[in-house]
Image: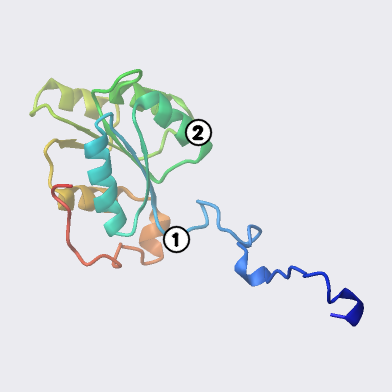
């Protein structure tokens, strides 16, 4: 500073401390798979989210199918995990909307719900659900299902969630 400016403090910014939004990765450029979990039971949604994040997935949640559909159309996930019985738009209706949309038709969807094996499972397969998982389910089984249906780009670049310590959360 020059002597004439000594009486006025000056603020200095170090650009390296500010986020560089120009270099921020979009969801499509990030390495970790993006999963959307849809369940009206917040505790279940948080538990699934915590388990998936422990295995290096990026996760968002939605409370019902309508909210999920809006998020899917804004930022397409790599996999959708949805409960069936929810308010406003249930899992079947969400799946129907996904399969009707040519841009989303190939989006992998896992349907989960509380019912035991019954006609609902056959309906979900007929509607082109990629996987069916009854509640309660083993978190390891869900992780295995997701890895099997991930888009090929994750299998080809060696991503398999190795960052995890291999443990799972059973209760919150």
- Seen from this angle, which residue lies furthest top? 88
Q: Residue at x 68, y 71 (%)?
A: 14
Examine the rendered structure and indicate whether residue 19 appears above or below residue 122. below
Residue situated in front as seen by the camera: 149 or 71: 71
Colouring mode (rainbow / by chain / secondary structure / one colour): rainbow
Position in image of residue 38 (x %, y %): 32, 34
Q: Residue at x 28, y 67 (%)?
A: 162
Q: Indicate left or right for 2 with 95 as reference.
A: right
Position in image of residue 24 (x %, y %): 58, 59
Residue tagged by mark 2? 73
- Seen from this angle, which residue lies furthest right? 4
Query: Residue 133 — which label?
Result: none
- What secondary structure is marked by label 2? helix
Disc 1 crowd rating (10 Å Cα; few below 14, some 14-19, many 20+) is some
Position in image of residue 77 (x %, y %): 42, 43
Q: Residue at x 29, y 47 (%)?
A: 49
Count the marks: 2
Using the rendered image of the protein, determine whether residue 128 is visible from the camera's viewpoint: yes
Q: Indicate left or right for 11 with 44 as reference.
A: right
Residue 67 occupies which quadrant of the picture?
A: top left
Residue situated in front as seen by the camera: 51 or 120: 51
CB atoms at circles 2 and 1 under 8 Å apart? no
Q: Residue at x 30, y 67 (%)?
A: 163
Query: Residue 31 — which label?
Result: 1
Q: Indicate left or right for 112 with 128 as reference.
A: left
Mark 2 or mark 1: whose residue is earlier in sequence: 1
Q: CA distance from mark 2 to mark 1?
A: 20 Å
């Amino acid at each position: 500073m020059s002597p004439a400016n000594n009486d006025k403090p000056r603020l200095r910014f170090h650009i390296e401390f500010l986020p560089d939004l120009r270099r921020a990765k979009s969801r499509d450029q990030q390495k970790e798979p993006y999963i959307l979990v849809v369940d009206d039971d917040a505790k279940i949604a948080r538990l699934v989210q915590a388990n998936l994040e422990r295995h290096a997935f990026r996760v968002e949640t939605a409370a019902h199918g309508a909210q999920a559909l809006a998020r899917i159309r804004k930022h397409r996930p790599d996999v959708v995990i949805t409960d069936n019985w929810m308010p406003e738009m249930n899992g079947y209706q969400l799946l129907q909307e996904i399969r009707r949309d040519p841009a989303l038709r190939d989006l992998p969807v896992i349907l989960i719900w509380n019912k035991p094996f019954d006609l609902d499972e056959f309906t979900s397969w007929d509607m082109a659900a990629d996987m069916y998982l009854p509640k309660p389910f083993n978190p390891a089984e869900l992780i295995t299902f997701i890895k099997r249906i991930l888009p090929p780009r994750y299998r080809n670049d060696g991503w398999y969630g190795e960052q995890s310590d291999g443990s799972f959360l059973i209760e919150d």
